[in-house]
Amino acid sequence: MPNIELKNISRYICKNINLKINEGELMVVLGPSGSGKTTLLNVIAGLTDYEGSVSFDNKPVDGIDASHRRIGYLFQQLVLFPHMDVKKNIAYSLELNKLPRSDIENRVDELLRLAKIKHLGNRYPKYLSGGEKQRVALARALAPSPKVLLLDEPLSSLDLQTAKYLRMELRQFQKNLGITMVYVTHDLSEAEEIADRIAVMNHGNIEQVATPDEVFFFPENQVVSNFIGAPNILDCCSCRKLEQGVVEADCNGLPVIVAHEGNSVNRIAFLPRDIFLSETRPPGPGVNRFEGNVSDIRYTDDSVRVTVDVRSHQLVAEVPYHLFEDMALAPGKHVYLILKLRRIRVYDCNCNDRMHDTGLK
Amino acid sequence: MKGVKIILKKLNPGWGIVPIFIFLIIWELAARFNLVPGQFYFPPFSEVMAEFFNLASTGVLGDNFLASLWRVLAGLTAGSLAGVMLGVIMGWKEIAHKSLNPIVSLFLPIPPLGWLPLLLLWIGINEWLPITIIFISSFFPVLYNTIAGIKSVDKDYVKVSRTLGASDIKILTTVVMPLALPMIFTGLRLNAGHAWRVVIAAEMVAIPTGIGALMLRAESLIRIDIIIVCLIVLAVMTFIFDKLFGYMENKVTAKWS
């Protein structure tokens, strides 16, 4: 399976994009709607004209039509051929190659088994559920043994449960087949679940390419930080194991208890919505409870972001409008914060030389 | 109770015929009991049917019917084939659409019978005249439905076919044309009824044989019963053609459409 290299790609919103995807890697292209993710996939597939250069295994494929690039493409709407049954859909590319009938039947059977849809072979797409359609589309894309598999939000129309299950299966497929995969999504949690690396896109630019943990704990710039929810990120200098799976991290004077199996904590992060903010001292044990003064209040589309000075740190909490209206919050006001224990993410890597780079670009 | 429901359910397909029976009974009674002014011009249904059998047994109806049927089949087949072929090209290749659409749009508003005076001079009074008019009347609806059918196919089908290794011609023949079939059939069904109306009109105006010509002769002889027989034949044939194309469409697309 090849590596893919994009050099100075420009098309529509995409401007001068450079990206290298390693052989056998699952690269997730993450970004909001209209950021140019699908355009990028179409460029790799050869389905659109572009400026710049695309290489598979260091060989340029720019003049090669999509039909000869040996790529599999799973579209957002899956686009199964409605006039063909499942077997015909899967066999489509094989019949184009005029393979012997017995070879086609064997390959289709193999893919039906692989995608766990053997019982659906004679059904037409209109009689399939969303999850079944997704499996058929995957089997069809894999039929010609593509070098690269491109997926454009293929699970976006499924319910959360089915999507999660299929995501895991997809990941398993990718590992077993060792195929290079480019997966487009706007959902951070989806990206984090399956990606080897994530390329964060915004307004046609790639803002950051990194592992899921690196994107969350070391957002390259404010754009990336905002996209992943503008988490509070705290460096931690030491930690103390309290009991199995529970650690108290010292985040520059702020003792935070986190659920963590390891022995060290280098950095913690939590989203503003995972901080509970109160005007009065909350009852109960004092675990992960802090007090401080409001230093800033910012209004967003659906909530209010309140910045609170806690010792030497500034923590941002998100308060829904309907709660904010009932509170008398103003700069200087003394408030109490509770960090939701299970929502605190822990970065535990002693070898990362970016650990001390906390400032956003 | 359940048994009655099952019987009613089984009879259900036949319910549509009941209003026709009621209509025929009212027609028969109204004519017999002189409920319609000018009875001479309003024969009862039974007399119309008697004339139908008379015309059928003497071969007059058969000869004229077959003449009309041949013209309809020839004109409809040629017009539809030409419409589908040009429609596929215009729907698939934007350059063809842009080049030909202005010309097609210019000819489209002309009613098929509007060509009659010109065709009378160009072709003369012979078999080609009604066939050509039916050709013209069939061509445009099928052309436009085919263009719309081809253009309405989601571009993602084309893209996915391409990534699966299909050439342009393969995409057209194995994906786009099959997906455009429902719309093409809509055009064909429209045509089927239209062709019968046009052939009758053409035969009434210029051709001495066929159902239209028979109607015109009946009119000059004030044979209302024969006129009604011809109208019934026309209605039944339009109905049969519509159902035939509906059946073909169903056969081809029902499994997936």
Image: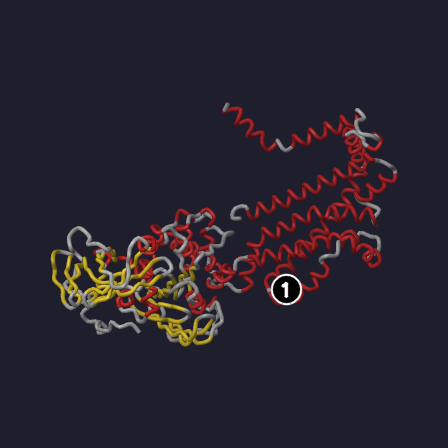
Expressed as whole percent of the image width and height from the top left, the position of residue A151 reads: 40, 61
Q: Position of residue A354 (x, y in %)?
A: 23, 73
Hey, which quadrant is residue B118 in on the image?
A: bottom right
**Residue at 62% over, 50% down:** B185
Residue linked to disc 1: B97
Q: Amino acid at mark 1?
A: His
Q: Nearer the viewer, residue B191 or A320?
A: A320
Q: Residue at x 48, y 58 (%)?
A: A95
| Left/right of residue A317 with respect to residue B231 in the rendered view | left
Total numbered labels: 1
Q: Is residue A22 visible?
A: no
Please determine whether, in this image, residue A342 is positioned above or below residue A29.
above
The chain to which mark 1 is attached is B
Q: Is residue A105 visible?
A: yes
Q: How is the image coloured?
A: secondary structure
Q: Is residue B242 left or right of residue B3?
A: right
